[in-house]
């Protein structure tokens, strides 16, 4: 089984961290391929960058020239999952939805701890669109930019732990979701400080994707995610495909 794990930003070190987190939980026989878009923003922290990322991710997947069994969109609260589902027959798993659905097996309500405050509405909207908002206690911002997670990991952990503790104490969250693909590998540190289960969307998405492939299930193509109609698309990076 081969799963493509596609970073939504163009920072290669973030792709490596995400792919490493995915490989840590992948079953024997599952190959994880990390992809970095060839264009887009170095970090995705707003609507414009998210829409650019949606196109960049689609382009990266379309240009991958080997067989694959599933795709993981490794960006929290990002646009584009629906477009990938139109493109592909194989399962497409978004880490925002994967984290939330996993959290709902573990507690009554969950909270998301993310990066900057400006990303909170994007995540809230994605959860609402997916029908996962009713059991979301809160979406909290740590105040850190995506790239700061790599540049100052100690400060990042402290800020994330602080907001996670507040979510448990003030919002009555019983599970914490790490709201950024760049937070890969922080689960144990946050869990030890909060005493509640902590879900990273990347490993959660891997296990969900693996289960869908083993069940022989793919994206329904009869209506909403039917293949795009064939037409001329001028100037679009995917036009060659």
Image (spheres, grey):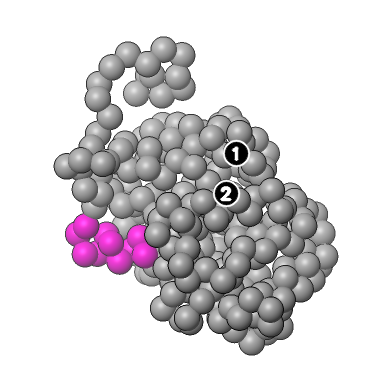
> Residue at horizontal 76%, vertical 73%?
162
Where does label 2 land, which residue?
A: 122
Circles 2 and 1, Cβ within 8 Å, touching? The answer is: yes
Q: Image height check: is 53 above or below 70? A: above
Q: Is residue 209 magenta?
A: yes
Q: Image height check: is 127 above or below 118? A: below
Quadrant containing the C terminus in the rendered view: top left
Quadrant of res 20: bottom right
> Residue at horizontal 77%, vertical 56%?
144
Where does label 1 land, which residue?
A: 47
Classify mark 1: helix, strand or loop. helix
Magenta stretch prevailing secondary structure: helix
Residue 65 horizontal/vertical position (percent) = 36, 35
Residue 2 horizontal/vertical position (percent) = 35, 53
C-alpha span from label 2 to label 1 = 7 Å
Q: Is residue 15 visible?
A: yes
Classify mark 2: helix, strand or loop. helix
How many C-alpha atoms fall within 10 Å of the one at disc 2: few (<14), some, or many (≥20)?
some
As drawn, is 61 to the left or to the right of 160?
left
The magenta stretch is 208-217
Q: Image height check: is 132 above or below 10? A: below
Residue 55 horizontal/vertical position (percent) = 48, 32
Q: Is residue 60 magenta?
A: no
As drawn, is 118 to the left or to the right of 63?
right
Whichever of callouts 2 and 1 sits on the residue coming sooner in the sequence is 1
> Residue at horizontal 56%, vertical 54%?
123
């Amino acid at each position: 089984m081969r799963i493509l794990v596609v970073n939504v930003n163009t920072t290669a070190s973030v792709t490596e961290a995400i792919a490493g987190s995915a490989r840590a939980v992948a079953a024997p026989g599952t190959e994880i391929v990390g992809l970095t878009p060839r264009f887009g923003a170095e970090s995705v922290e707003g609507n414009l960058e998210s829409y650019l990322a949606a196109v960049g991710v689609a382009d990266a997947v379309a240009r991958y020239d080997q067989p694959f069994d599933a795709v993981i969109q490794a960006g929290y609260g990002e646009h584009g999952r629906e477009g990938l589902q139109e493109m592909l027959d194989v399962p497409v798993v978004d880490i925002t939805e994967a984290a939330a659905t996993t959290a709902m097996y573990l507690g009554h309500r969950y909270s998301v701890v993310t990066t900057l405050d400006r990303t909170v509405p994007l995540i809230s909207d994605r959860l609402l669109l997916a029908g996962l908002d009713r059991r979301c206690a809160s979406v909290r911002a740590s105040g850190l930019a995506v790239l700061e997670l790599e540049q100052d990991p100690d400060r990042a952990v402290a800020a994330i732990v602080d907001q996670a503790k507040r979510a448990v104490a003030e919002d009555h969250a019983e599970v914490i979701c790490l709201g950024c693909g760049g937070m890969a590998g922080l689960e144990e540190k946050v869990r030890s400080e909060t005493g509640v289960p902590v879900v990273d969307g990347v490993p959660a998405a891997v296990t969900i994707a693996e289960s869908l492939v083993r069940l022989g299930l793919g994206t329904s193509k009869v209506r909403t995610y039917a293949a795009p109609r064939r037409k001329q698309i001028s100037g679009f990076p995917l036009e060659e495909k």
